[in-house]
Image (spheres, rainbow, N blue to C red):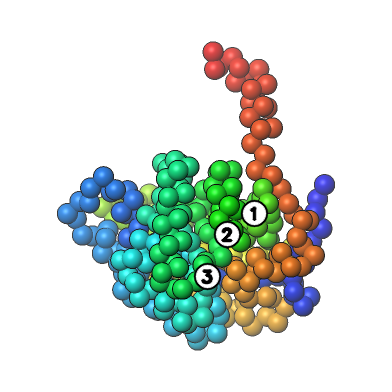
Amino acid sequence: MRAPPYRWPDGKRSALCFTADVDAEAPYLWTHRAGLPRHLALLEQRRFGPREGLWRILDMLDRLEIRGTFFTPSVVAELHPQILPALVERGHEVGLHGHLHEIVAETTQTEFEEALDRSLAVFEAQTKARPAGFRSPAWELTPGMIDALKVRAIAYDSSLSGFDHPYEIDGLVEIPVQWQIDDAVFFRFFGGGVDKWPPARAADVGEAWIEEFEAGRAYGQLLMITIHPWISGRAQRVAMLERVLAHVAARDDVWIATAGEIARWHVESGNAGIYAVESGLDAPAAAIAASPVTRRSAR
Ligand SMILES: [Zn+2]
């Protein structure tokens, strides 16, 4: 049965959460974990984030008085120890995003838990606080990962997209993401002939994101914007983000909050329990097993 509309605080109609995945070099280091090449171009492209892009994004958010959530691989925090303290000092939330940006399909449960514990230790050492939230590298999750997060009392995950407002999956609060409001889809461009298409024009993407915000208000949507400072710290993209966020902030019926604030609202409001789902892999697995076609082709 369909769940009732989501309720936001103070009768607000919808919500906006600005998040950044502060990946910097981490995914490149994961890819080359067997040995780092002597090449500089991709590394330098990514180092633009900690060096310049992140600070442009932070200044832009200051101008709009918006606080965001910055999911940061702990190897990035180790290589750039100024980042986490600066984010906290400027009023933003910091969240977990793996250690070496471990890609879920290439990582065992034990390795995931080792990376999680390492990242918790780095965050606690650098910020003197325990982070409330986790976002998985490349937005993948397993039931075992959910269990590991719950065991460590992580308050919420932000990696899935089963609703466009907060919900719970296997008892863990989920603050959902959406690929269509992620910058990497439109702008990531590595060069060297590997890309399928050129980067999109930022103004076109910003227009689409404003359309998504306006259309989503009727559904009480959480507009979960995700950017990467090494990608969206570039000039026309910072300008685009400022236009989108200013457009949203000009509405008086939208709640702008960090992912941690939204997770707390979810638990403390009447929404808790209404949108609770199970990871539920058994039924689809049984459906595959019972299908005559797959039984034939598996022989
Ligand atoms: Zn990432």
**Residue 213 in the image: x percent, y percent?**
64, 68
State which tag comes first along the sequence, 3 or 2. Answer: 3
What is the number of the mark on residue 200? none
Q: CA distance from mark 3 to mark 1?
A: 18 Å
Q: CA distance from mark 3 to mark 2?
A: 15 Å
What is the number of the mark on residue 154? 2
Residue 231 in sight from this viewpoint: no
For image coordinates 80% across by 65% down, the residue present is: 270
Q: Quadrant of the C terminus?
A: top right
State which tag comes first along the sequence, 3 or 1. Answer: 3
Horizontal placement of 121 versus 251: left or right?
left
Which callout, 3 or 2, points to the residue nearer the camera? 2
**Residue 132 in the image: x percent, y percent?**
56, 65
Ligand 1 contact, mark 3 (Cβ < 8 Å): no
For image coordinates 51% across by 76% down, the residue present is: 92
Callout 1: SS: strand
Look at mark 3 in the image and give the residue it sits on.
69
Given residues 162 and 246, the one toward you in this image is: 162
Tag 1: Cα neighbours inside 10 Å, few (<14), some, or many (≥20)? Answer: many
Report which quarter residue 248 is drawn in.
Answer: bottom right
Which callout, 1 or 2, points to the residue nearer the camera? 2
Is disc 3 in contact with disc 2, using a CB cutoff of under 8 Å? no
**Residue 101 in the image: x percent, y percent?**
40, 54
Tag 3: Cα neighbours inside 10 Å, few (<14), some, or many (≥20)? Answer: many
Which amino acid does the dot numbered 1 rest on? Leu
For image coordinates 74% across by 54% down, the residue present is: 275
Given residues 48 and 150, the one toward you in this image is: 150
Callout 2: SS: loop
Q: CA distance from mark 1 to mark 2?
A: 9 Å
